[in-house]
Amino acid sequence: MSPVAPDVQGSRRFASVAELAPRSASEQAWARFAQAQTAEDFCSSWLLIQCDTIGGVSDGVVLLQKPGTQEFVPVAFYPDAPNDPTHLAEISERALKEGRGVVVPRSLPGDEASNEPRFQLGDPIRLEGQVRGAIGLDLDARPDEQLQSALRALQWGSGWLEVLLRRHADPQEAARLQLKLALDSVSTLLGQAGLKESSSAFVTELATRLACDRVSLGTFRRSRIRLCAVSHSAQFDERANLLRTVEAAMEEAVDQSEVVVSPPAQDNLPVISHAHEVLVRESMAGSAVTFPLVSAGEVVGALTLERAAGLRFDVPTLELCEAVAAVAGPIIELKQRGEDSLPAHAVASVTQGWKKLVGPGHPGLKLTAACVAAVALFLAFATGAFRVAADVTIEGSVQRVIAAPFNGYVKEAPGRAGDIVKQGALIGRFDDRDLLLEKAKLVSQRDQFQRQHREAMAKHDRSQAAIVGAQLAQSEAQLDLVEQQLSRVTMTAPFDGIIVSGDLSQNLGSPVERGQVLFEIAPLDGYRIVLRVDERDIPFVALGQRGELAVTAAPGRKLPFTVTSITPVNLAKEGRNFFRVEARLEHEGMRLLPGMAGVGKIHIEDRKLVWIWTHTLTEWVTLKLWTWLP
């Protein structure tokens, strides 16, 4: 059997073309074409429309490849029952082999002398680059320009047969083709950087691939749909009535979160399609369908497709468009976010977080938010004691300094820092040998001057007596000074207390100079608390305020005190300024020693906890802003 041998055993379920009235033949052909359920009905009605469009066609045939084989069989003839179904086999087979449109002149038998022979046209049917069928026509004589026009019309119309092949391909092949078409459409959407440019290319690609008159894309912004792109239109007027009707159809589908088809593919669908009916009526389209574009469960836009009068969307096409819309939704949303400003990003993030918080799911987020809210409420209303912390040093209420009374050498020093001494206890002694020699010398000079004075008085030599008397007085004064220094050779404690500083035990025999501080002694029965308060906290401190301190030696014991003095002189330490604040202990809860250090806290008043914890940072930021601002 020839690969293009006719197969006419299939039943024909459509009426003969000859039975159609001349005026209504075209309308009925279009009606059958729109409602065709089988490949034979589709091809027969299409061939009738094609032959009527081209005109002057005496015979026509459509060959299609059997699924899963390499055999091509006729599925439609024009007219319905041709006299010779094989006379177009040659031109059809040539179109299949060459894979291009073919025009061949043909002379009728007995008409060899005719100057206007008839012509045969052959054109292949391609799908994804492969030849899947062919069309053959027998035409009457016409000029070359009309022949080329007829061939172009045939090539344009063969796109409908490509749709048929996609629809009736085997399941795996159909799935592959649908996937490829979806990926091609989505790749077009990803091919441009901007949303407007990529959307325009996307809808134009869909309109071309799915044989749609118009495809429109809208984005969902601020609770309404705004038209973003229209196929085959780089620019469009959003205020046009027809485009507003398209937006209304999109909003109708988005409000219902359902695909809306008009006319519906099935009866009694639970969707409202009033806006789509208006769109079909005003645009004079054959059908319209809108798919909501969804990303992460949220509607981000809508896709509306319209076909020409007399054409409807079949189920495979709707399934394909639904798959494309499912993939395009997240891409549209991603491109929208990429073009949003920083405030818009912030608003979107807050909105998304709020929806997660009040919507279903996300228990972890809800628990965290509840905890944060509870903490915020607690901080907003809870109060606590505001206290100023400062480093503390313990000093004696009185502090006595023992200094060197004269230049000399240390003979012994039994006392040193940290020793507790009684009043009059020996804490150090100077070497008095030089003083004793000086005293002996001065005593001898005094005695000598006394004898000279007596002799002068006995001789009544008044001038000599006056001179010797003066020398005697000078000698006695020097002797008194030495005796006074000898009385200070021994250093004793002036009162009961503790030696705060001074240790000469390692410096026995070393020289000391007059006025050099050797020991500091503080009493044990009176203390003075010295706090170094940071300059940021000094405005809160006032006389009479109370507080507590804890020394390093006993951190678990808290001793109450009262502020008695605030000095206006600051102390610089480690790059910060401190003010000296003095306080007195209210009662002695433990034995303290001068020089002990610790931490004290002055109670100011009760304030909000949030202010207590943040006022330092707030004041720092306020100062920095004031510094930076002009």
Image (cartoon, grey):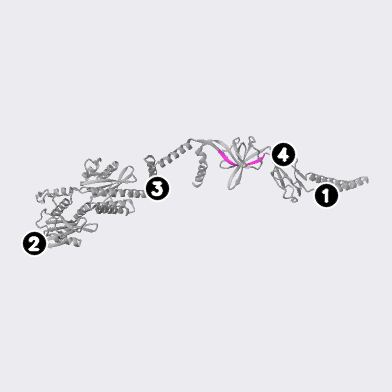
Q: What residue type is labelled 3?
A: Leu
Q: Name the residue under label 2.
A: 108
Q: Give the foreground label among 3 and 1.
A: 1
Give whichever of discs 4 and 1 has the lower sequence position.
1
The answer, for residue 144, to whether it is visible in the render is no
Say if the magenta span includes residue 394.
yes
Q: How far apart are marks 3 and 1 (CA)?
A: 96 Å
Q: Distance between the residues labelled 4 and 3?
A: 75 Å
The answer to the question of whether label 3 and label 1 lie on touching residues, with beta carbons closer than 8 A, is: no
Q: Which mark is residue 437?
A: 1
Quadrant in the picture for residue 539: top right
Q: Which amino acid does label 1 sit on?
A: Leu
- Kindly give the residue lying farthest to the bottom in the view shown: 113
Q: Which amino acid does label 4 sit on?
A: Asp
Q: What element carries label 4?
A: loop
Q: Which residue is drawn at 24% across and 49% down?
A: 317
The answer, for residue 138, to whether it is visible in the render is yes
Q: Mark 3 points at which residue?
A: 342
Q: Give the foreground label among 1 and 2.
A: 2
Measured as percent of width and height from the top left, residue 77 is found at 13, 54
Q: Give the foreground label among 4 and 1.
A: 4
Give whichever of discs 3 and 1 has the lower sequence position.
3
